[in-house]
Image (cartoon, rainbow, N blue to C red):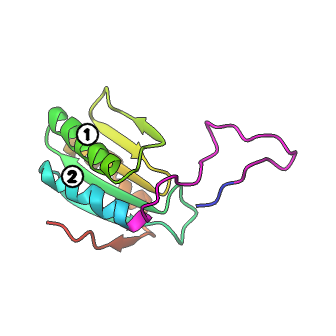
Amino acid sequence: MRSSATTEAGESPDPMTTRPRAASPIPAPELLRAAAEAAVGKKATDLVGLDLCDLDGVADYFLICSAGSEPQVKAVAEAVEERLRLLGARPWHVEGREGRRWVLLDYVDVVVHVFHEKTRQYYLLERVWGDARSVDLGVE
């Protein structure tokens, strides 16, 4: 991921729109696999890892997974967050915790999407990023 410390005018970037460099000492592929293992541990299904490194994406990798109920969406997201925290990674941004239909955990280089099954069918995120390469997550 690319980011800059200042704008062309020499001003500090807006922290809400400028993605920081990853603070985690853990390489992104390892974070991706650890997140996948945590998700599987909470019975997440249909896991897909996408490599966005060669695309102009918002991250280097996506993990997309499904859960059958809102409580399971919450449980999967919490398990992923806890597992990555143990590795020294903290999310830069989290969305959707309250709604529990689509929780997004943004670790800058890795973004984890935990979908309720029906919400995932609606958004079809894999199709939006259809040019991305699949990543073998080493799980399931």
Mark nearer the N terminus (2 vs 1) = 2
* Label 1: how many Cα within 10 Å (few below 14, some 14–19, many 20+): some
Residue at image point 33% right, 51% down: 84
Give the CA separation, mark 2 to mark 1.
9 Å
Q: Which residue is mark 1?
A: 78
Q: Is residue 64 above or below residue 73?
A: below
Q: Is residue 106 above or below residue 3?
A: above
Q: Is residue 27 above or below residue 6?
A: below
- Mark 2 belongs to which amino acid? Ala
Q: Which residues are magenta?
A: 4-29
Q: Which residue is mark 2?
A: 39
Horizontal and vertical percent position of residue 25: 46, 59
Residue at image point 27% right, 49% down: 83
Horizontal and vertical percent position of residue 37: 21, 59
What SS does tag 1 mark? helix
Please tell me the numbered disc located at residue 70. Answer: none
Of residue 76 and residue 25, the one placed in the foreground of this image is: 25
